Amino acid sequence: MEMDRMDENDWKYHEEGNKSLVVCHVQHCRVLRLLKYPAEDSENPPQTAEQAFRQIQNIVDFTSNVMSRLLGDKFVHSGEVVRLPLEFVRQLSIKIQHQRPAWRCDKVMDIYSGCALCLPNLTTPTQYQPTATPPICIEIKPKWGFLPSSKHVSRDIKTRVCRYCMHQHYKVANGKWKRRSLYCPLDLFSGNRQRMHFAIRHLIEEPQNNFKVFKGGQCIYSSKEGSEGSPDMNALLHHLRPYFLRGNNRVNGHMTAKAVLNDFIQVLVNALLSPAGGDGGPLTHRAPEGRSFCEASLFSNERVRHGSQGLPSSSVLSRILQTQMLDALDIEGLYPLYCRVEQHLQDFPKDRTRLQIDGPYDQNFLENVQKSSMEDDGSVEYAAAKVHQYRIAMTAKDCSIMAALVPSVKEEDDDEGNPGCPLGSCNSGTSGSGPPEPPSCSL
Ligand SMILES: O=P(O)(O)O[C@@H]1[C@@H](OP(=O)(O)O)[C@H](OP(=O)(O)O)[C@H](O)[C@H](OP(=O)(O)O)[C@H]1OP(=O)(O)O
Ligand SMILES: Nc1ncnc2c1ncn2[C@@H]1O[C@H](COP(=O)(O)OP(=O)(O)OP(=O)(O)O)[C@@H](O)[C@H]1O
C-alpha cells in the first residue's frame, strides 16, 4: 500500500465493534482497523498521535508475542501499524458515516492520529485459486466456554449457569436484544458433535453479536441491534444452497432447506474441530475442572452423559478455551489483586514500567507472566502477573473465529457442467486445491 496515494474511494465500510471500526479495500484483500473514541471526545482527541501509534503497536505486539503463541500462529494475524494521510482519514470518515449502525454512533472514528492497524481481510481468503462461487466466511464470537471453579466464587449459580446464558437475561432486560438467544458456549466448546450442532443452530437462529456470515467479503447474515425480527434464515439458505448441491439429502433431486442447513452446520463443526497443524504454542491441555454443562442449556442433560468426547487439543476451540482458563481465580479472586497493584502504583508510580503494566509486550512478557508462582506470597509481582493472565484470558473470551470455507476448484462443476458441492468436497479432503483453510482468529 502506498501511503501517499491513499484514496478514500478505494475503501469501503466493512464492520465495527465497540473499540474499532474496520474498512476494507475494494480490490485488495486488506482491511484497516481504526480506533474509535466516545463522540463527546470528538473535538478533543483523548490521546496524541504518538500515543495512538503506541496503542496500536501494543496490540500488534500483544497479538504476536502473546495471543499468537497461545492460540497458535496459524490462527492469529498480528497485522502492522500504518500511518495514513490525515486528509484520507477525514474523507473516509465522512464517506462511511451513513453506513454505520445508529447504535454504534455514540463513538466516532479516530480522524486525528492518522494511525491504523492493517490486516488481511479474513472474509476474502486469498490462498486458494479463485472459483466461480465466492468463499463463505463465518464469524463466531464464542464467548466464555467454561464455568468457574475458583474457590473465590461466592454464588453457587455461577458454577451452574454460564456467563453467556445469564447475560442473555440482562441483555434482553436492558433492551440490547429483543429476544434471548438459546445458544450456549459450553455446548459449542464441548467437542461433542451433537452439542456443537445444537449450539450453532441456535447461533444461526438468534445471531446477536456472536454470528455473522460473509459471502465474497460481503456480510449477508447478521443481527441488527434493536430490530424486531430475526434475520432472514431463508435468505441465508438461498445463498448457501449452491454450495451443497451434491449432498445426499435430496428429495426428488431438490435439496430441502433443512438439509442445506444441516450440511452447513456439519461443515462448520468439522472446521472448528480440525487440527491446526504445526506448533500450537506452550499450552498444556487443561480440562475444565468444574462442570462442563450449563444448566440453562436446552441440550438434554441425559444426552450429555452419553457422549462427551472433548475437544481435539490442537483445534482452534481448544486453544481458545485453554487461554480463557488462564483466568483461574475468577473476577472475584482477581479483584483484590487488581486493587493491590493499583494501590502499589499509587505509592510507587515508577514501578509501572517494571511491572509492564502498559507493555511492552515483548518476547519475555508471556514467559514472565507464566513463571509467576501459584501461591500468593503477598507481593505486587504476584498480583501483577495474575492481572496480566486475566487480561490475556479476557482477550480469548471476547475474540472471534473467522472460519473461511473455500470452494474446491476440481469439483466445482460435475461431468454435465452442473455446479458441484464445493464445500462438501473441500471438507472430505478430495479437493484439488488442498485442505480447507483453517479457521483464523480475529482478535
Ligand atoms: O461483557 P460482554 O460479555 O458483554 O462482552 C462485551 C461485548 O459484548 P457482547 O458480549 O459481544 O455483546 C462488547 O461487544 P459489543 O460492543 O456488544 O460489540 C465488547 O466486545 C466488549 O469488549 P470491549 O469493552 O470493547 O473490550 C465486551 O466486554 P468484555 O467482557 O470483553 O470486557
Ligand atoms: N481482519 C479482518 N478481516 C475481516 N473482517 C474483520 C477483520 N477484523 C475485524 N473484522 C470485522 O470487524 C468487526 C469489528 O472488529 P473487532 O472485533 O476487531 O472490533 P472491536 O471494536 O475490537 O470489537 P469489540 O466490540 O469486541 O471490542 C469484527 O466483528 C469483524 O466482523
Image (cartoon, rainbow, N blue to C red):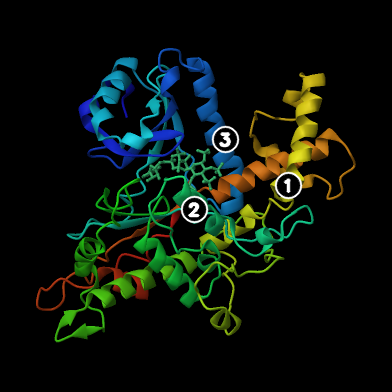
Residue 332: mark in rendering:
1
Tell me which corner region of the image, top left, top right, bottom left or bottom right, holds residue 162.
bottom right
Residue found at x 57% / y 35%: 61
Give the residue at mark 3. Answer: 61
The reply to whether dot 1 and dot 3 touch (C-beta < 8 Å) is no
- Relative side of 75 to 372, left or right: left
In this view, 170 is above or below 204: above
Q: Which residue is mark 2?
A: 75
Q: CB at mark 3 closer than 8 A to ligand 2?
A: no
What quarter of the picture does the N terminus occupy? top left
- Residue type, numbered disc 2: Phe
Disc 1 secondary structure class: helix
Q: CA distance from mark 1 to mark 3?
A: 29 Å
| Residue 32 visible here | no
Instruction: Report the amino acid beneath label 1.
Output: Glu
* x and y, in percent, of residue 117 in the image: 43, 32
* Foreground of the two, 418 or 149: 149
Q: Is residue 136 visible?
A: yes
Q: Which one is in front, 78 or 24?
A: 24
Q: Earlier in the sequence, mark 3 or mark 2?
A: 3
| Cα gap from disc 3 to disc 2, whole angstroms | 16 Å
Task: Give neighbour class at mark 1: few <14, some 14-19, many 20+ (Cα, 10 Å).
Answer: few
Q: Position of residue 12 (x, y in %)?
A: 25, 35
Q: Is residue 261 above or below residue 344?
A: below
Q: Please tell me which of labels 1 and 3 falls first in the chain.
A: 3
Residue farthest to the left, as pictured: 416
Residue at the image position 38 percent from the left and 56 percent from the top: 207
What kind of residue is marked 3? Asp
